[in-house]
Image (cartoon, rainbow, N blue to C red):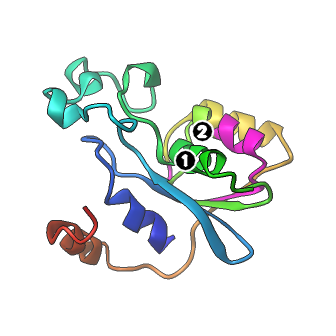
Amino acid sequence: MELAYVWSKRSTCLRRHVGAVIAKDKQQLTAGYNGAPKGIPHCAEQGGCLREKLHIPSGTRHELCRGTHAEQNAITQAAKFGIDISGGTLYCNASPCVICTKMIINAGITRVVFDSEYNDPLAKEILGQQKIVELSRYEGKRFNKEYLKDLTERKYLR
């Protein structure tokens, strides 16, 4: 889970910093963070977050966001580089939205471990209907998030 938080510090989103790591057999396969696709200007470079300007609540109208989610980026990186993630575990500092949930199921990921709850009732409903993905809240050792903030400020991760 700590690696998911490390990846979240690469986020270019102005609202949420989310990181995801996909692992199998105790090895990291791929990772991602939320932000604009490669070559596309980030919200900060475009005068701010459109969803924030329009007062759109979190978890709704994903199509108006410039960014892709951490889970989506981790899955697409695996596809891009030919990495088999089926049977893997996705670690994310937030539970998946409905779009990411569908991608997780179709990618063959069999376990999702999250730290904080992201309020998306449809994602929970879909996960409850299928028997493929096990969803569990992270209950391991807590670590110092201020350490990660300090690393980012020193630009070690940028």
For the C terminus, the image quarter is bottom left
Q: Locate residue 156 relative to residue 87 in the image: left or right.
A: left
- Give 157 or 116, whichever is nearer the viewer: 157
Can see residue 48?
A: yes
- Farthest residue toward the front? 81
Look at label 2 and name its amino acid: Cys
State yes or no: discs 2 and 1 in contact (Cβ < 8 Å). yes
Is residue 92 in view? no
Residue where numbered disc 2 is placed? 100
Q: Is residue 69 toward the left or the right of residue 121 in the image?
A: left
Which of the 4 image quadrants contains residue 129?
top right
Could you tell whether 127 is left or right of 34 in the image? right
For disc 1, the marked residue is 71
What is the CA distance from the residue labelled 2 to the residue labelled 1? 6 Å
| Nearer to me, 55 or 89 | 89
Which kind of residue does numbered mark 1 sit on?
Glu
Q: Residue at (69%, 62%) from the top-left corner?
A: 89
Classify mark 2: helix, strand or loop: helix
What span is in magenta? 101-117
Q: How many marks?
A: 2
Mark 2, other Cα within 10 Å: few <14 / some 14–19 / many ≥20: some
Q: Position of residue 72 (x, y in %)?
A: 55, 42
Is 1 drawn above or below residue 69 in the view shown? below
Please provide percent x and percent y for residue 108. Answer: 78, 48
Q: Residue at x 47, y 70 (%)?
A: 3
Residue placed at 25% from the left, 22% from the top? Answer: 50
| Residue 65 part of the magenta-drawn span | no
Q: Residues within 10 Å of mark 1 (few under 14, many from 20)?
A: many
Which quarter of the figure has residue 65?
top left
Q: Is residue 71 above or below residue 100?
A: below
